[in-house]
Amino acid sequence: MDVKGLAPTNTYLLQAWLTDLSNATDVAEFTSDLAGAAKLSYKKGIASKSKGKGKGVGASLPSVLDPVTGVLGLDIVSVFTTTDISNIVSTTTQVVASADLTNPTQYQYLVQRNLDNDGVIAGATGSLRLRGQNNTQQFLLRTDHLVTNTTYMLSINTAVLQTLTSDRKGRIQNMDLPAGSPNVLDIWSVELLDGTTNVVLSTTLP
């Protein structure tokens, strides 16, 4: 996140509006640089860096932002601390910038992960790749070591949407987001079921 036009060397608070809460939640404090700018960057599972302008919190993705698909909006809040003649300290806050993420003009979403083996077929493996960018959505499911030439069912968000057949080597590669699937941002579960609806491979998202 890049922010410009802030008061120089001032303390600010990043707040998030989440789907399951009615009030904004504190995320992190940061300080603008001499030019009134700041840059914050977070990555899940990887230490983040605040590069260039401003000082941010060097931490992985804050838990309140996980999953990022549950973030509806962000606020930049100015924090002012004053001390009166009686040495009583008071703090005031003011929202100076905000972003509505419910209908973004641009976005990029990428998830890549291995599927969990649920114990039905020993040695079965798989991977999933989801990508969303503006008006483009990509879906890639790869599996290996399944029973050969066998029909399986692909379930998304617990709804069976497509049948897939393994090849003579027990592999499946599916690059099509099944008809009836939600937007990739709204996918929270992917499962591969056998003919008796046992879960062979699965994952939860994001």
Image (spheres, rainbow, N blue to C red):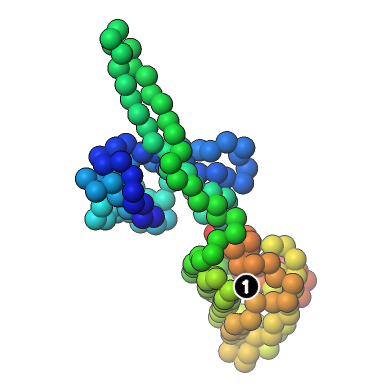
Location of the N terminus by quadrant is bottom left
The crowding category of the residue bearing disc 1, from other C-alpha atoms within 10 Å (few below 14, some 14 to 19, many at least 20), is: some
Location of the C terminus by quadrant is bottom right
User: Is residue 174 in sight in this rendering?
Assistant: yes
- With respect to residue 82, does 43 lie above or below? below
The secondary structure type at the circle numbered 1 is loop
User: Is residue 45 in sight in this rendering?
Assistant: no
Q: Residue at x 33, y 25 (%)?
A: 81
- With respect to residue 84, does 133 lie above or below? below
Q: How many marks?
A: 1
Position of 12 compared to 24: left or right?
left
Q: Nearer the viewer, residue 76 or 168?
A: 76
Per the image, the residue denoted by label 1 is: 121
Q: Residue at x 57, y 36 (%)?
A: 23
Residue 166 point in image, percent of width and height: 65, 85
Q: Nearer the viewer, residue 49 or 77?
A: 77
Q: Amino acid at mark 1?
A: Ile
Q: Residue at x 68, y 88 (%)?
A: 149
Residue 2 point in image, percent of width and height: 36, 55
Q: Residue at x 73, y 80 (%)?
A: 163
Q: Nearer the viewer, residue 50 or 9?
A: 9
Q: Quadrant of residue 150?
A: bottom right
Residue 198 point in image, percent of width and height: 72, 67
Residue 67 point in image, percent of width and height: 53, 53
Name the residue at the top extreme.
Answer: 86
Name the residue at the bottom extreme.
Answer: 168
Name the residue at the right extreme.
Answer: 196
